[in-house]
């Protein structure tokens, strides 16, 4: 049973030292009870108290690491059902399933293609997480060779898919330090799979087809066998049934602190889908609710791009807009005679404006004002993007020392600022630019 805040408080040192970041031990205890703080933040808690509090202070959903090195994937450790309650922290991994029946050269090329796919959106790099290798051949050595190839070519997290313990064992021998996700322990092979996972320090997926009760019992059995890092597969493949099962797992873990289901979830978007379009739709559902690992059966940039974008949107903190650093940016190598545009430091605004300017081919100075990550209109309405801040930025970043003119272009949406800005920047010519970024190239053609 979960401990209350007062139960936890009784086990704390009660020094009110504030070193944990909270004003009192009671406040810290309340946060521990709500799973919003870590016990390790208290430097003076006794060893006896640590033992008693370990389970109570553990995150409701365990943080599980798949893979090793710079591209490892961390999933789990979420604390809310809805991102607007707080935020989601660990993005689900997006894996592409590749069967070991492909010719060796074709398999290697596919692995390299998937690993090389990368794109940038609002300054954030996005990529496919890794490969899920399926033992479709039924041959241990073929499967192991594919695992070795994928690891060598990509250095990305891997999922090893096989119910054959011997195949998983052969693959793990080829990639001893890769820490792939083993898929999957079932009631028939759980003991052997758990032994392999423990030996190679790899996370283990647990699959049951007899409901959440059976899944919980199997997960507990595997945990008792010594494997702590688990990923759950409730077995449902229909989109409706999957949504119900995943929501129930999330609610039981967060609301009821039901430990046997307090792990990330794996989902297979291609299984049960009748087309690539349906697979993408189901994958989008899994990203939103509540998969930690999503496996696709097809690799198509036209499908992967929107899924990566959706994932980025959902896992962006709604209370902290994505921002770029304020300052004076040089676009396309501007000279002292080049135009000077100004906008806010909201990432989407910056990249929209910068993209249009660079697409125009006209060298331009772009002054980014600190609006605390708000867009032009929102920043203006909130008093975060006004004449005083623009003028302060002009002086702060030494704009006058880098251009030979005194002409500054403000966004058309805040044309009303022109009079105020003239007062803040005496001797400057305040020009009103387009309302939309798409019209910037045409506007720059007329600038002189």
Image (tube, grey):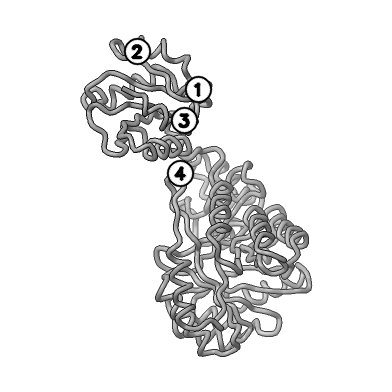
Label 1 SS: helix
Q: CA distance from mark 1 to mark 4?
A: 21 Å
Q: CA distance from mark 4 to mark 3?
A: 20 Å
Q: Is residue 236 above or below residue 6?
A: below
Find disc 1 in the rendering and name its residue.
413
Label 2 SS: helix
Find disc 4 in the rendering and name its residue.
122
Lower position in the chain sequence, tag 2 or tag 4:
4
Tell which tag, 2 or 3, sits nearer the viewer: 3
Q: CA distance from mark 2 to mark 3?
A: 27 Å
Looking at the image, can residue 73 be seen?
Answer: yes
x, y percent for residue 354: 40, 37
Lower position in the chain sequence, tag 1 or tag 4:
4
Tell which tag, 3 or 1, sits nearer the viewer: 3
Q: Is residue 192 left or right of residue 218?
A: left
Q: Residue at x 38, y 22 (%)?
A: 409
């Amino acid at each position: 049973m979960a401990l209350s805040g007062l139960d936890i408080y009784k086990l704390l040192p009660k020094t009110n030292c504030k070193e944990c970041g909270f004003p009192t031990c009671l406040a810290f205890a309340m946060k521990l009870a709500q799973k919003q703080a870590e016990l390790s933040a208290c430097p003076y808690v006794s060893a006896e108290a640590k033992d008693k509090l370990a389970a109570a202070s553990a995150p409701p959903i365990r943080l599980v690491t798949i893979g090793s090195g710079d591209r490892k994937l961390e999933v789990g450790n979420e604390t809310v059902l809805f991102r607007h309650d707080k935020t989601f922290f660990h993005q689900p991994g997006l894996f592409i399933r590749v069967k070991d029946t492909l010719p060796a050269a074709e398999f290697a090329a596919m692995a390299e293609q998937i690993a090389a796919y990368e794109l940038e959106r609002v300054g954030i790099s996005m990529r496919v997480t890794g490969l899920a290798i399926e033992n479709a051949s039924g041959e241990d050595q073929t499967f192991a060779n594919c695992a070795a190839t994928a690891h060598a070519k990509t250095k990305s997290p891997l999922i090893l898919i096989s119910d054959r313990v011997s195949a998983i064992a052969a693959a793990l021998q080829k990639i001893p330090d890769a820490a792939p996700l083993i898929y999957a322990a079932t009631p028939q092979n759980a003991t052997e799979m758990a032994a392999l996972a423990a030996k190679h320090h790899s996370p283990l997926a647990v699959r049951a087809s007899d409901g959440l009760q059976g899944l919980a019992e199997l997960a507990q059995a595997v945990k008792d066998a010594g494997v702590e890092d688990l990923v759950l597969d409730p077995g449902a493949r229909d989109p409706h049934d999957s949504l119900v099962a995943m929501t129930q797992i999330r609610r039981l873990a967060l609301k009821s602190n039901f430990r046997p289901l307090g792990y990330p979830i794996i989902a297979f978007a291609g299984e049960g889908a009748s087309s690539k379009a349906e697979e993408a739709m189901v994958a989008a559902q899994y990203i939103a609710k509540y998969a930690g690992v999503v496996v696709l059966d097809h690799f198509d940039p036209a499908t992967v791009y929107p899924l990566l974008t959706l994932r980025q949107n959902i896992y962006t903190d709604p209370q902290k807009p994505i921002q770029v650093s304020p300052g004076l940016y040089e676009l396309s190598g501007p000279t002292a005679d080049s135009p000077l545009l100004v906008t806010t430091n909201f990432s989407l605004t910056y990249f929209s404006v910068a993209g249009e300017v660079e697409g125009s081919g006209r060298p331009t100075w772009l002054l980014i004002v600190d609006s605390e990550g708000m867009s032009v209109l929102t920043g203006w309405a909130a008093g975060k993007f006004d004449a005083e801040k623009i003028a302060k930025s002009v002086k702060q970043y030494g704009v006058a020392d880098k251009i030979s003119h005194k002409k500054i272009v403000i966004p058309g949406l805040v044309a009303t600022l022109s009079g105020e800005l003239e007062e803040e920047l005496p001797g400057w010519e305040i020009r009103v630019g387009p309302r939309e970024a798409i019209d910037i190239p045409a506007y720059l053609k007329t600038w002189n």
